[in-house]
């Protein structure tokens, strides 16, 4: 892979894609004001509406005025606000469109990037449809069939179909997670288009740091690798999962991020990094061979370390 020359003389790139699961305003603000003070401008996904069903999660939504004001303030401070489905439960087409319209109204434009929420059946090309061919059978065996045929957002005519909206409104969708801190080493072609999954414009990969424990472990063990490789880390996490205990921000997380902030990294939102990669190298349309290599790598990691 050709080395990237990062802007502003920076040696590597580091950002975070944070899902809203289990996140409250009070604890979330502790994480974000800390990151902001250190100079990080990362990406926070939201649920724009509350929805009519039973929430799968107790994290806040933009239907709550305090939460909304906080998120608008984060946007003002330079964080990217991204999409995490309309809400935390499955939405039909009408509800998804309501969520997207609400997002546009609240934040002044469509989301640039998104990640699917695990619980939602309107996800696109998700569950066992993330992989193709024989790999689908392997995936279903590993997951005991619980994600078999349960994503319908890309299925035209289905009541949960919204793939046309996704293609029209959203540029980048998160896909495979890897244990390598250098997301670009694991997923060198990102952002990429997959012609077998045409309703998503461009996919991106991420590095696995889904809760405080795994986030810290990745930074502790691999920070040097990221810098030495002049790489790019899109850390995927839930700041609602274990970063604040009894009202206090995890001290090890604080120490690791403070150290990282002193390195010459480019600490900008996910979409800014993906736009930059697109500008520098264009985008790739996957060949069958490239798709097969990427899916196999991810599936193998899933067997080994349980990647998302
Ligand atoms: Zn989620």
Image (spheres, helix red, strand yellow):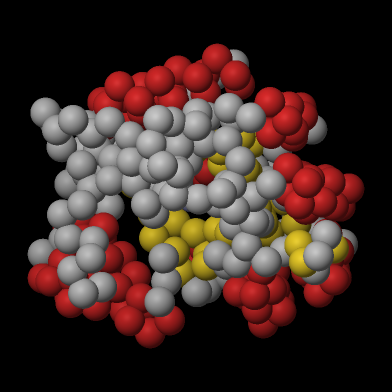
Residue 226 visible from this viewpoint = no
The residue that appears at 31% across and 65% down in the rendered structure is 294
Quadrant housing the C terminus: bottom left
The residue that appears at 30% across and 22% down in the rendered structure is 94
- Give the percent coordinates (x, y) of residue 184: 50, 61
Given residues 25 and 129, the one toward you in this image is 25
Q: Is residue 131 above or below residue 74?
A: below
- Give the percent coordinates (x, y) of residue 30: 82, 51
Left or right: where 6 falls relative to 97: right
Q: Is residue 303 above or below residue 162?
A: below
Q: Is residue 168 above or below residue 254?
A: above
The residue that appears at 33% across and 81% down in the rendered structure is 303
- Give the percent coordinates (x, y) of residue 36: 83, 45
Given residues 230 and 27, the one toward you in this image is 27
Left or right: where 183 falls relative to 196: right
Which image quadrant is residue 239 in? Answer: bottom right
Q: Is residue 41 above or below residue 168?
A: below
Which image quadrant is residue 249 in? Answer: bottom right
Left or right: where 159 falls relative to 257: left
Given residues 95 and 78, the one toward you in this image is 95
Left or right: where 156 falls relative to 61: left
């Amino acid at each position: 892979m050709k080395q990237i020359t990062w802007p502003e003389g920076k040696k590597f790139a580091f950002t975070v894609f944070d899902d809203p699961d289990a996140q409250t305003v009070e604890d979330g603000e502790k994480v974000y004001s800390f990151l902001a003070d250190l100079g990080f401008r990362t990406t926070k996904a939201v649920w724009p509406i509350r929805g009519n069903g039973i929430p799968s999660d107790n994290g806040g939504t933009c239907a709550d005025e305090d939460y909304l004001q906080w998120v608008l303030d984060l946007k003002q401070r330079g964080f990217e606000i991204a999409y995490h489905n309309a809400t935390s439960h499955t939405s039909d087409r009408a509800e998804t469109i309501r969520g997207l319209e609400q997002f546009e109204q609240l934040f002044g434009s469509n989301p640039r990037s998104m990640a699917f929420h695990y619980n939602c059946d309107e996800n696109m090309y998700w569950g066992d449809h993330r992989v193709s061919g024989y790999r689908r059978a392997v995936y279903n065996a590993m997951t005991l069939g619980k994600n078999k045929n349960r994503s319908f957002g890309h299925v035209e005519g289905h009541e949960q179909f919204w793939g046309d909206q996704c293609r029209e409104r959203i540029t980048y969708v998160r896909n495979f997670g890897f244990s390598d801190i250098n997301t670009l080493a694991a997923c060198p072609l990102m952002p990429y288009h997959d012609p077998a999954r045409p309703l998503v414009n461009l996919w991106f990969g991420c590095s696995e740091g889904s809760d405080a424990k795994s986030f810290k472990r990745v930074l502790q063990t691999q920070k040097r690798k990221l810098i030495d490789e002049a790489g790019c880390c899109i850390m995927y996490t839930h700041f609602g999962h274990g970063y604040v205990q009894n009202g206090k921000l995890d001290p090890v997380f604080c120490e690791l991020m403070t150290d990282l902030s002193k390195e010459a990294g480019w600490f900008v939102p996910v979409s800014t990094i993906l736009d930059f990669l697109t500008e520098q190298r264009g985008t790739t349309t996957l060949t069958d061979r490239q798709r097969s290599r990427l899916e196999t790598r991810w599936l193998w990691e899933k067997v080994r370390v349980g990647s998302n």
